[in-house]
Image (tube, rainbow, N blue to C red):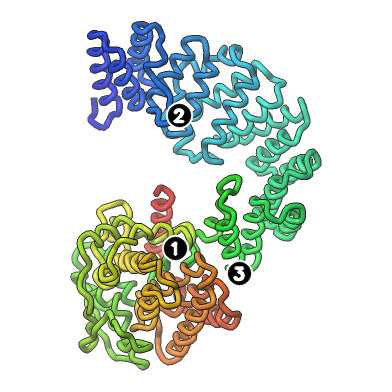
Amino acid sequence: MPEDDPALSAVEELALARLALAEGDLPHAAGHVAAALVQAPTLPEVHETLARVAAASGGDLDLFPLGHHAFVGAVVARAHLLAAAGRPAEGLDLLAAATGYAPDADWAGVPWVTAPELPERLEPERTARILMQLCAAVPDPVPRRLREPLRPYLTLARNAVTVHPGHPLLLGAASALARRLGEAAVAVTWAARGVRAQPSKLGEVWLGYAYRSAGRIREALAALGRAVAHDPDDLAVYADIAGTLADHGRLDEALDWIDRALAKDPTFDCAVHTAHRLRFQRDGDVAHLVALTDFVRDHPDDSHEHGDLAECCRARPWLGQLTPAGGPVPDALRRAATAEGRARIAVRLDSLEPPSAMRAAAAVPGLDVEVAAIADPDPREPRRPTTRPVWRYEGTTATPTLPAPSAEAAERIRQLAHPAWPHPPAAYDAAVGLATLDLADLLGLLVHPPEAPDTALGRVLAGQDPSLWVRCVQVWACLGLLHHRTDEPWAESTRRRVLLELVWDVEDWITESALFALVTAAWVDPAVRPDVAGVLAERLADAATVARERQMPIAASLAHLALATPEVDPSTRELARTLIAAAPGEPRPGTLHRLWRRLTVLFRRR
């Protein structure tokens, strides 16, 4: 049997189970069978051995105990024993719980679950509740890679609908499961039959969702409208209607529905989340997302988790991801990373680029960078005096002034750094893992980034865009600075002072990272917003002044940071838009665009 076959471990567990059975040690036999079920939940030999354990123990369910920390293999084994003992409804409850815990395992791929006669032994309402339990436990829709283990439940639903063709709750629950598994036409058929059998708000909601999945939007909106007529106080349906309208370009109508919901209850979480998302979709003003962040912080006990904030921030510069660096040197780094063989790449610069970029280029064999001139204002000089410069120049060569970080700090950042995050507050929360690092370590990481980790993410970055890994390290090190001495009041704090010095030091990728940390602080703490908005306004105005005299590779990125800043003034927002419009095209053609698609996949799997 191949070494990577999961049944190999199951076979070993079964051998141990049989030895324990022969010795009369039923608890150990049961434990090995439960472990084998986890490895190979549909392997016939596992179920044969489970039957032997049941026969030897007289069907003792206590061999597979339930509890707060129950082993999933024991839960599944108990489910099969309950079914064999004539209690299939209880068994299905446990299988559904196991599926919610590990939806990629084929827990239900066994004959008794898909037997056509099973629904005759179940009350239709109980079957409906089990299907609803499953729907609550899996994504909507279920990703294709996770659908196959759930198909036995869809077979159960088909069989149940055949046995109980007029039960409205069963038809609606079956429709909900079918819709999640990509069976939109079947979902519509079942939900429509359920509404005909007994019109109700819940039935119309199920029908509306089914129509929406099938692309029949007019009928979906009609069904959801009828649901509102059944229960005008269910504001979640208002939010669903608004979301459906917005998804199909009818934003004004969507906002009308949300305003109707908020007029009834201005604190209803689904309506508030949807309202802020739609208003941001309408005008792109980050104030809506900041207000949503404040609402989430002030209402920690929302009825369920919402994804509106992450949806709005996804793939947007600095709101949800790090922007790739622009300029000739980062472009050359990408070419060098993807070049075949040992071809040399020569780059001649009309002006000196950021020291982090030049330092990264110097570490790449075969990449030759020549600086033709030093344009004014001199990029080697800090924009304001600093007590702790991080770079020292000898001619056009930048050298770090800070010692390398500790091995612990390097490993910590390698585990944490990533070019994307759900939204700024989530990035802040994730960076708490750096809170125990010394200030010297955090600063050392900025100019001595460790090698990318030997992970899928690290290999993609090293093989496609080494500059992006350097920027990742710098961003997360600056986020780590936000967690340094948090007991100090913001205005006089070490974290604020250090970040401001980094902001006004020489023009570099570190400038962007330090500003992003300040912006993140403003998202998290309303009290610091006026201060941060003022810093962004001053730094962007200075960048605009420099950009009028010479090329400034980080100008567009600073502008995106300004647009992501809470409470920034209108004139700064206008200046930011002007700088973005004047910047060269996004550095994402070809290979870089493919890189971001791959990184997006990795991030979603994280």
Relative side of 359 to 577, left or right:
left
Disc 3 versus disc 2: nearer the observer: 2
Q: At x 30% / y 12%, what residue is drawn?
A: 26
Tag 1's secondary structure? loop
Label 3 vs 1, first from the N-terminus: 3
Q: Are marks 1 and 2 in contact (CB under 8 Å)?
A: no
Local crowd size for mark 1, using a 10 Å CA cut-off: few (<14), some (14–19), many (≥20): many
Type of amino acid at the residue the image marks with label 3: Asp
In this rendered view, identify the residue nearer to me: 125 or 325.
125
Local crowd size for mark 3, using a 10 Å CA cut-off: few (<14), some (14–19), many (≥20): some
Label 1 vs 2, first from the N-terminus: 2
Type of amino acid at the residue the image marks with label 1: Gln
Up-down relation of residue 214 to residue 417 (above or below):
above
In this rendered view, identify the residue nearer to me: 456 or 76.
76
Type of amino acid at the residue the image marks with label 2: Ala
Residue position marked by numbered label 3 in the rendering: 285
* Residue furthest right as drawn: 229
Q: Position of residue 167 (x, y in %)?
A: 70, 22
Q: At x 38% / y 76%, what residue is drawn?
A: 499
Relative side of 44 to 202, left or right:
left
Per the model, the C-alpha gap separating discs 1 and 2 is 35 Å
Q: Position of residue 534 (x, y in %)?
A: 51, 81
Residue position marked by numbered label 2 in the rendering: 98
Q: Position of residue 486 (x, y in %)?
A: 40, 66
Disc 1 versus disc 2: nearer the observer: 2
Tag 3's secondary structure? loop
Q: Quadrant of residue 3?
A: top left
